[in-house]
Image: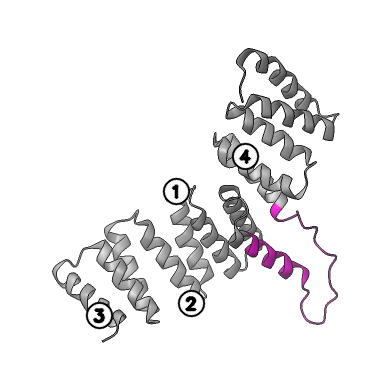
Amino acid sequence: MDDVERADRVYSRVLQHHPDSPQALLKKGLLLNRQGRWGAAIQLFNRAISLRFDYREAWAAKGQVLLTQGKGKEAVEAFDKLVSFDETQCDAWIGKARAHVAAGEADKAAEAAGRALALSKGNADAKEILSRIRQTAQTPPSGQESPRAMPPKTIDGGVLLEIADSLLEKGDAQAALKGYEEVLAENAKDAKALFGKGRALHGLGRYREALRTFADAVKAAPTVEEYTRWLRMCEDRVPKEGGV
């Protein structure tokens, strides 16, 4: 008897005595998934979810099995629910991005991958997804001419900047800072990213760093009055409050 079969018997016995145990249902479902019995695994994940609706591990497992089955749109629903429980989990955004790719929704996939990058700077899975989206966008159907190459930042850079702005508006300056830094790693003179980074640093109380960043934003875009206004405000604040 191998380990999988032994574990299968153990969880089957547990479920005989505790048929409403979400944890046992999840474990049994994971074993069925390893055996390629996807339909049965989904049924157990659904039972676990019906008993504990916010069971994130069950939603994640269900989404992964649906992806394995090629059911992209159903997988999107599972990962949407997972993200709704906690928007700070990078793995949930990665799963959501992959589900959108499987569903043929490139823009939404890029947005989800961008959220993952905002949470985990340089995340290899997110970068791989964005690269695949970019390659697909540049590859024409058979018999058609190749379109003009898409600029590298039209997917990840632009989307990531919007996501970072959104995170900052929601008050998550730390996550927003990661997003702005990811954009600036590609283009150190991106004025919008510099301005956003300055605001994020300001929100974190890192006023001296913010001052330098606002100065860089003004240098990159000297005609934008808002950048100059924040620079002046930060200049007034640093002598009074210090900061890092």
Q: Is residue 161 magenta?
A: no
The local crowd at label 3, few if under 14, some if 14 to 19, many if 20 or more residues have their Cα within 10 Å, is few
Q: Secondary structure at mark 3?
A: helix
Seen from this angle, which residue lies furthest top?
240
**Dot 4 corresponds to which residue?**
177
Quadrant in which the C terminus appears:
top right
Q: Quadrant of residue 129?
A: bottom right
- Of labels 3 and 4, earlier in sequence is 3
Can you say which quadrant of the picture contains the N terminus? bottom left
User: Residue flagged by tag 3: what amino acid is it?
Assistant: Arg
Name the residue rendered at 31%, 80% in the picture.
4
The reply, left or right, for residue 2 in relation to residue 168 is: left
Residue 120 against residue 215 in the figure, above or below: below
Mark with earlier residue (1, 3):
3
Mark 4: secondary structure: helix
Mark 1 vs mark 4, foreground winner is 4
Query: Are the residues at dot 1 and dot 3 in contact (C-beta closer than 8 Å)?
Result: no
Q: Secondary structure at mark 2?
A: loop
Q: Which mark is residue 86?
A: 1
Q: Label 3 belongs to which residue?
A: 6
Report the residue marked by disc 2: 69
